Image (spheres, grey):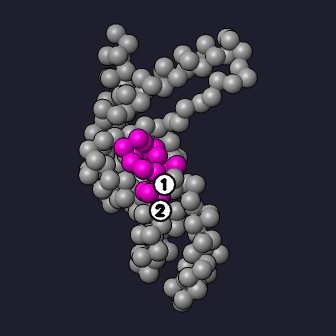
Amino acid sequence: MEREIIEDILNGETHKFAKLVDKYQQQVANLCYKLGGDAIDVEDATQTVFVELYASLARFKFQAKLSTFIYSIAFNVVSKTIRKNKRYVRLEPEKEYDNMTESAVDKEIIRKEKIDELHKAIDKLKYEQRVALTLHCFEDLSYKEIASIMNASLPKVESLIFRAKNNLKKMLIEQNS
């Protein structure tokens, strides 16, 4: 189905691009937020991803999933924005406490404090480690997909994730000592 839509778009039926936007817009926005957090305007980044996708559809050769191609564009857009802004990642939006019991609120606050510790540690990782870890752990992408998105070798991705996990473990142990 996606192949047909892309071929139609390339043959001049540009209105069909809206189908791709509808299908992937939320995923792209979520990924942009996870990679760039408060350092970027997620709406602008998402729009830029789709502009670049439209411009590069002719290069897509169906050798990988379309989502992987789109994620690689998102990775590049967010990376450029972060380099320009020199700011980093926030992974989870705030959660409302409405309609929760007091003990549930206490547990949620403790959980959020632990998540905040994790975010602070993730923020301290080198950018490539942070991206590889985010794509693997929060987007459930395979190492092969991450390698394609980051334009890196499979061993490099494996190494980045391994080092990211080790560095996180060290930082969290230090924070709790």
- Dot 2 lies on which element? helix
Specify whether residue 98 is painted magenta. no
Q: Taking 9 as reference, is 21 above or below it?
A: above
Identify which residue, 23 or 171, lies in the foreground: 23
Residue name at image x 41 percent, y 41 percent: 38
Q: List x then y, in percent, for residue 74.
A: 42, 58
* Quadrant holding the N terminus: bottom right
Residue 45 lies in the magenta stretch:
yes
Three-letter amino acid code at the position of disc 1: Glu
Q: Decide: few, some or many residues near mark 1? Use Cα within 10 Å; few <14, some 14-19, many ≥20.
A: some
What residue did someone put label 2 on? Answer: 47
In-image side of 18 versus 52 (left or right)? right
Instruction: Please name the amino acid that badge 2 sits on.
Output: Gln
* Closer to us: 134 or 47: 47
Tell me the residue at 41%/54% (across/down).
146
Foreground residue, 160 or 21? 21
Labelled disc at residue 43? 1
- Contact between marks 1 and 2 (CB within 8 A): the answer is yes
Majority SS type along the magenta span: helix
Report how many numbered discs are placed on residues in the image: 2
Q: Position of residue 63 (x, y in %)?
A: 47, 72
* Point 27% across, 39% down: residue: 126
For disc 2, the neighbor class at 10 Å (few under 14, some 14 to 19, many from 20) is some
Residue 152, position in %: x, y?
A: 31, 57
Q: Which residues are magenta?
A: 30-46
Query: Distance between the Cα atoms at labels 1 and 2?
Result: 6 Å
Q: Quadrant of the C terminus?
A: top left
